[in-house]
Image: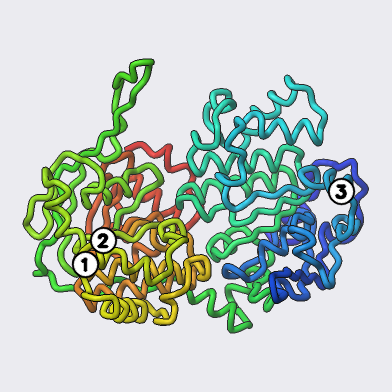
Amino acid sequence: MSSTAQNDTLQSNAPQSNAPQSAGPLLTVDDLSVNFKTPGRTVKAVKHVSFSINRGETVALVGESGSGKSVTALSILQLLPYPTASHPSGSIRFDGEEMMGADDVRLRDIRGGRISMIFQEPMTSLNPLHSVEHQINEVLLLHKGLGRAAARARTLELLDLVGIKDAAQRLQSYPHQLSGGQRQRVMIAMALANEPDLLIADEPTTAVDVTVQAQILKLLHELRQKFGMAMLLITHDLGVVRKMADRTCVMKAGEIVEAATTASIFKRPAHPYTQHLLAAEPKGGPRSKPDNAKLLVEADDLKVYFPIRRGVLRRTVGYVKAVDGVSIHLKEGHTVGVVGESGSGKTTLGMAILRLISSDGAIRFDGRDLQGQGTRKLRPLRNQMQIVFQDPFGSLNPRLSVGQIIEEGMIVHGIGGDYDARRSLIDAALEEVGLSADFQDRYPHEFSGGQRQRIAIARAMVLRPRFVVLDEPTSALDMSVQAQIVDLLRDLQEKHGLAYLFISHDLKVVRALADHVVVMRDGQVVEQGARDQIFDAPQAPYTQALMSAAFDLEIADPGAVKE
């Protein structure tokens, strides 16, 4: 079906709004500019941006972090922090009505009523002090004036609509009691509570697993058809754009550098930056390794059980089997990729192998038994076994300079001699990961996400480890930055003969790095084997569902797959 025909179909099924509707586009953004005043200078975040969205249409704003996508979206709802933010130029018309300069009463009617927004991180967007029912009810009470009983019934209907299982039991749950996918579904339910004409989705799938991503995208597509609403999709994931958008606007440094139908963007990208984005996906596979490499890390029948305690006396009534009988063997210079959904036990496995949490089962490093060894006996091995965490900002101490952060481990392990010698080694470590030695005296908040991740890698590499656990090291990064980090990890592995345990839910990155792949679900290994075997001919239904979700984005709920 053509885009025009599809839009006509969607419009015919759209709910009738009480607000007057104009004959033109639903949303028109014309010559929009946004400046932010900072001490000593003005930052031009958005520069003369223009685009429109028709009823029932999905338009994507695509670009890397800092390109101005979210600032443009927040301008539509007038949610920027004024007077720090200002609009030197521009007009934003929604259904023919000017939004720029609209009074607070009118904006409140439109926000959440006719225009709703799904924010990027549901954990920070949802109020941790209120239940799911309270937060959805608030939207209904404010805009619909429903009574408590009617609001509760509508909330149950919405939760069922977005695929929350056992909705009645979830009403009194708090955000921290839900998974990432469930929290995102609650955010969608809140956004759809008043059947908006326009839904703004700001990176709606960035923080979720590939299977949950597929479910969320399928849900948004179905809801768009059901309600006939328009959608502004903000993302850096081109796979999501290809699946969802009718038209695409590519943003760079606050400007739209290319705008066309999505099919045209992917088939015939005109602007060099668009071509760069399309080529930025991690490509290729791991570099060739000798098969006779030395066995470095062994974990056999590893188990990590967390007790469930209840009652006044906190008696143990059961166990959460986070890792249940997992075995992994890793050679020098090789990479084992561990994949699976959130809660599958991937990170717990990595922490257990490093002896950062207690476990049962055999763990050997370079032939040496690590189980039963105390902290003092393990310390001499710690510099040889390192970890790079998922969130580079959260894992770097904001009170320390980059040099001090990298130097900490060197001081603990007696590496580098005196202060000047350590500074010299830190210079070399920063340059090895593609950063300037001048960064030593700057602080984490002064860097981009990709630069912070490089600093975290330098902190591990300066100790000259032999084994590194990489826990989702690229999940929070733009596609082009992901590709750079993958290339960096390949180079470091080849140069130093490193063994990697690469934990990720991004199967495209795993395919680019791993020699051997382990698929986990509910603490157990569902399937494992050589990279090509797992990606090209997966045997287990769950692995097949993961692959379909990652590369097709058309899979139904993999949770329904029966092993």
Judged from the image, the secondary structure of the residue bearing numbered disc 1 is: loop
Residue corresponding to mark 1: 465
What type is the residue that disc 3 sits on? Asp
Q: CA distance from mark 2 to mark 1?
A: 6 Å
Compared across the picture, whether 207 is left or right of 204 comes to left
Q: Quadrant of residue 126?
A: top right
Q: What quarter of the picture does the N terminus occupy? A: bottom right
Q: Are marks 3 and 2 in contact (CB under 8 Å)?
A: no
The reply to whether residue 142 is visible in this rendering is yes
Colouring? rainbow
366 or 154, nearer to the observer = 366
Q: Are marks 2 and 1 in contact (CB under 8 Å)?
A: yes
Judged from the image, the secondary structure of the residue bearing numbered disc 2 is: strand
Q: CA distance from mark 1 to mark 3?
A: 57 Å
Q: Residue 369, percent across and down?
A: 8, 50
Compare marks 1 and 3 and give the one earlier in the sequence. 3
Residue corresponding to mark 3: 104
Q: CA distance from mark 3 to mark 2?
A: 52 Å
- Residues packed near mark 3 inside 10 Å, few (<14), some (14 to 19) or many (20 plus): few
Picture layout, residue 125 above or below residue 449: above
Judged from the image, the secondary structure of the residue bearing numbered disc 3 is: helix
Residue corresponding to mark 2: 386
Q: Quadrant of residue 266?
A: bottom right
Q: Are marks 1 and 3 in contact (CB under 8 Å)?
A: no
Q: How many marks?
A: 3
Picture layout, residue 332 above or below residue 472: below
Q: What quarter of the picture does the C terminus occupy? A: top left
Compared across the picture, whether 74 is left or right of 90 comes to left
What type is the residue that disc 2 sits on? Gln
